[in-house]
Image (cartoon, helix red, strand yellow):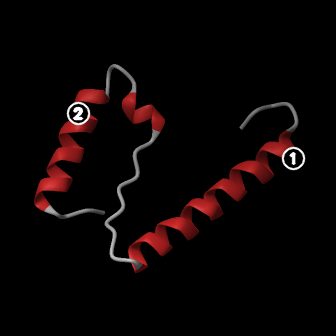
Amino acid sequence: MPKSNVEFWENKLYGNRERDECIRKELEAMGWKVITVWECQLKKDKVERTLEELYSQITSQKIK
């Protein structure tokens, strides 16, 4: 959490989380399988492992 303007960031991050959850539920209700990829999972030291995990999830159809 940033140390400045804390109230703004708390509200923004909470709002983002709520919006993302709502959209995920809507997509699943329409029959979509949803995979969440965090930005930190795409950093140089993790991207290869992340892509392998995504490939495995997609091809096995065991999407969390």
Q: Secondary structure at mark 2?
A: helix
Quarter containing the N terminus: top right
Q: Quadrant of the C terminus?
A: bottom left
Q: Position of residue 26 (x, y in %)?
A: 49, 74
- Residue furthest bottom in the image: 29
Rendering quarter of residue 20: bottom right
Query: Label 2, label 1: how many angstroms apart (C-alpha)?
Result: 35 Å
Q: Mark 2 or mark 1: which comes first in sequence?
A: 1
Q: Residue at x 63, y 62 (%)?
A: 19
From the viewer's perspective, is residue 37 above or below residue 59?
above
Q: Which residue is labeled 2 in the image?
A: 49
**Residue positioned 24% across, 46% down in the render:** 54
Give the residue at the far left of this rendering.
60
| Residue at x 24%, y 37% (from the top left corner) | 51
Circles 2 and 1 in contact, beta carbons < 8 Å: no
Which residue is at a point 81% across and 31% down the rendered structure image? 3
The local secondary structure at tag 1 comes to helix
Q: What's the amino acid at mark 2?
A: Arg
Q: Position of residue 62 (x, y in %)?
A: 19, 64
The kind of residue on which mark 1 rests is Glu
Q: Is residue 15 left or right of residue 31?
A: right
Residue reaching furthest to the top: 44
The x, y position of residue 27, in whole percent, is 43, 70
